[in-house]
Amino acid sequence: MFVRNRWVIGNWKMNGTLASNAALLESLSAPKPSVEAQSARLAVCVPAPYLNQTQRALGGTGVLWGAQDLSEHRSGAFTGEVSAAMLKEFGASIVLVGHSERRQYNAESSEDVAAKAAAAFDAGLTPIICVGETLLDREAGVAESTVAAQLAPCAALIQRAGAALVFAYEPVWAIGTGRTATPEQAQAMHAFVRSELASIAPNARDASILYGGSVKAANARELFGQSDIDGGLIGGASLVAADFIAICGSL
Ligand code: 13P
């Protein structure tokens, strides 16, 4: 039987200094036997200027790293953008695409997100494709159709990449609010995402689907124990070494 990969990924967002990162990375680089035994994948997505520092600290430790966004273009006159090839030069193996903060503050459309995910995949990076509804969507009863519409432009990529892709369901109303989706709410949406993926391409049913939104050491185990939840994408708690390591231990 195929075993889906389990992940805990820290999203540092726009936080950190060279000094604070050094301490955090040092604690992540120590061995974590309970996690390694399950061949789970641990990773951090750092601000691009800190990729060099992260590569130096985590190289050879088994902990992976990546960025929080990338350009859909390979190179050229795109001031301020960072390409997949540049991320690869700093040892990145993953990259977030379509995080709700980028959709909201940078007006990224689901078509933009699909183009970025394809650029990442074609360069040998694993895109972590983020989807999720707002509170208004949920209250209007359109949470599932919103998420389905976010996935739809990725259909061609899903058909060729299948289970090599990673998805993250992050309800916008649960991000940074302390208001976590209940395990039942999260499981229900994960099951829906998995059925959508399977309807696009049968082998995409085995893609990893991570939950994000106010995950903490206290709620991680119950969330990760749901049958369609393959781990977590962690914001605030990934900045505190003890909290992040405890969440990793909940896989
Ligand atoms: P919080 O864990 O801070 O709610 O953030 C979740 C998130 O946006 C991770 O990408």
Image (cartoon, rainbow, N blue to C red):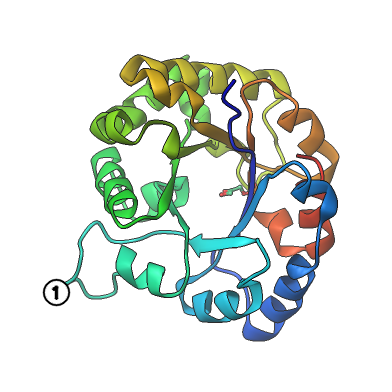
Badge 1 element: loop
Residue 165 makes an appearance in the image: no
Farthest left residue?
Answer: 77
Farthest front residue?
Answer: 1
**Residue 92 position (above or below residue 230):** below
**Residue 208 position (above or below residue 69):** above
Label 1 is placed on what type of residue? Ala
Give the quadrant of the N terminus: top right
How dense is the environment of label 1, judged by Cα within 10 Å: few (below 14), some, or many (20 and up)?
few
Residue 160 located left or right of residue 3: left
Give the quadrant of the C terminus: top right
The image quadrant that residue 184 belongs to is top right
Residue 205 image offset from top left, x and y in percent: 46, 21
Residue 130 located left or right of residue 14: left
**Residue 199 position (above or below residue 211):** above
Picture residue at 80% right of the left edge, 56% below the top? 245
Q: Mark 1 near ligand 1 (CB under 8 Å)?
A: no
Picture residue at 23% right of the left edge, 32% below the top? 156
Residue 42 located left or right of residue 110: right
- From the viewer's side, name the closer residue of 176 and 41: 41
- From the viewer's side, name the closer residue of 218 and 154: 154
Count of marks placed on residues: 1
The image quadrant that residue 44 belongs to is bottom right
Name the residue carrying label 1: 77
Residue 146 makes an appearance in the image: yes
- From the viewer's side, name the closer residue of 222 and 43: 43
Residue 247 image offset from top left, x and y in percent: 78, 47
Picture residue at 66% right of the left edge, 44% below the top? 177
Residue 69 image offset from top left, x and y in percent: 40, 59
